Image (cartoon, rainbow, N blue to C red):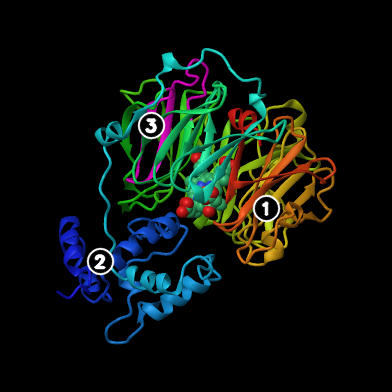
Amino acid sequence: MNTRIAVTGVVMGLMAALGTTAQAQQAAEQAPAMTPAEIETGRKIYFERCAGCHGVLRKGATGKNLEPHWTKKAADGNVQEGGTLKLGSSRLAKIIALGTEGGMVNYDDILSEAEIDIMARYIQQAPQSPPEFSLKDMLASWKLIVPVEQRPTRQMSSINLKNVFAVTLRDTGKLALIDGDTKQIWQILDTGYAVHISRLSASGRYVYTVGRDGLVTLIDLWFEKPQTVASIKLGADARSVDTSKFKGYEDKYLIGGSYWPPQFSIMEGDTLKPLKVVSTRGITVDGEYHPEPRVASIVSSHIKPEWVVNIKETGQILLVDYSDIRNLKTTTIESAKFLHDGGWDASKRYFLVAANASHKVAAVDTRTGKLAALVDTKKIPHPGRGANFVHPQFGPVWATGHLGDAVVSLIATPSEKREHARYREYNWKVVQELPMPGGGNLFVKTHPKSRHLWADLPMNPERENAEAVYVFDLTDLSKPAVKVNVARDAGLPETKALRRAVHPEFSADGSEVWISVWGGKTNQSALVVYDDRTLQVKKVITDPQMITPTGKFNVWNTQHDIY
Ligand code: DHE
């Protein structure tokens, strides 16, 4: 039997089920041939490397639309369609290998030539819709490893829990818990695939992590050594979790957002028992139906029993009231596409979120439940959770870096403090753009006790930028940023893979800044700890298990949303 098949059969069945158009059908019929093994490889690589930006259904978001009607070269050799270039295998392979100026990263140092060839053909096939994931599926995946009554009733170790750091070891699917006072690794635990973020319960006792495979793990810090006490799957693909932080609801609920299926789920905070699943499929701010509106950032309000849930593809911001889970009330706020990450302003009344493809930041007033502002910024804002400080000239500001531009933007935020009344005229204006040596910033960070703003550049194409961070002096923002060469300071051997300096995170008291050296997936790597006052290295934390460290979440700062 000839094993080289175009996936036409499978795809046609799916398309019939999904009611896709004749145009897509025709595209699938002409798709380049692939063996079942190649399709499986393509499916796996697409999930691991591409779906985050382009979407499972390849409709596009941060990344371009990758549906076959334009990835596939027209059979008649005419490569223009409605002014759009249709691509075909060789052009696609080049883009995958070398990246683009539009922000697509190069994969020639991550994928082999054969894998790039597979991916160039895979994305010309019609996209397949993965299975849905119901409350019943969640329940079937739920593991209550240590029931609440078998857990400690007080903290069993003498570790200063406030200053523990939960560190993502991205490519090993593990989380390192590090004692921030002694800088010793306290425990390393298994988590989901390419674990993404960690968040803290309101009490600071529980750490929640979510993997890209949708696996949520609940870790109890009260044991002598931290232990995973429960786990559950949210779906096939996820990025965000947060807990109930409003008074009276501490540690009661967890919310998790999925990329696939597009939905959010509510669970018990101390057991992860699933309670409710809510679909986010619906209408975009442009009034069009979208089949895959993914849940991007989620944050828990401190002033109401409410979560702010940001829906990427629709550009709708949901305020989900968790005071009555059975009769769930949700306020839907129109903003802009495609919503990604964000954080609170200093007062924790306003949530600011990047609508990255619109080059805007949307600000929600969680007190009134309305959009407060849509602020135009430079290209592709990417704040992480942003950074708050009082600007000497413009008063309270929230900072975001940009993936697509060489600045950090400072947006003035309202304040009810009497001493800030004179800054009112600046509210929601970009009051300053701090120059960076290039684009590719992912995270900025400061701390109320610090006089510095730290900005990384891990996605900058130049090694010397990607391996360094830039530090601004908040008392004099006319001064250029000081460059800190983190990869060099780590003292590890140079490798072919970039050793990207990523995600500055402060210690609980604001005296230290921890930065990850995100190296290759087979290279031992490190965290470099700086004295925030002197910008000198205090400690390099390294270990054979320290592979691909990325996000770090200080317990106290994450619990209280201090940034
Ligand atoms: Fe993230 C936050 C999505 C790639 C490290 N990332 C987030 C959030 C979202 C998101 C929606 C906000 C969560 C919240 O606040 O509830 N990230 C995505 C993607 O879709 C994307 C672009 C591609 C993908 O396939 O996942 C992506 N992210 C990355 C990385 O490659 C990073 C740099 C390294 C890694 O570990 O994978 C990365 N993302 C992070 C980190 C945060 C994050 C460290 C939390 C920042 C914080 O300070 O809160």
Element carrying mark 1: strand
Q: Quadrant of the N terminus?
A: bottom left
The stretch of residues the image draws in magenta is: 243-270
Q: Quadrant of the C terminus?
A: top right
Nearest to viewer (mark 1 / mark 3): 1
- State left or right for residue 443 relative to residue 135: right
Q: Give me the residue at 30% from left, 51% from top.
A: 291
Does the beta carbon at disc 1 come under 8 Å from ligand 1?
no
Q: Position of residue 262 (x, y in %)?
A: 34, 45
For label 2, count other residues whose C-alpha is less than 10 Å away and answer few (under 14), some (14-19) or many (20+). Answer: some
Check contact, mark 2 vs mark 3: CB within 8 A: no
Q: Position of residue 529 (x, y in %)?
A: 73, 43
Nearest to viewer (mark 1 / mark 2): 2
Structural distance between the alpha carbons of marks 1 and 2 = 41 Å
Q: Quadrant of residue 136?
A: top left
Label 3, on which residue?
Answer: 330
Structural distance between the alpha carbons of marks 2 and 3 = 44 Å
- The kind of residue tagged 1 is Asp
Nearest to viewer (mark 2 / mark 3): 2
Element carrying mark 2: helix
Structural distance between the alpha carbons of marks 1 and 3 = 36 Å
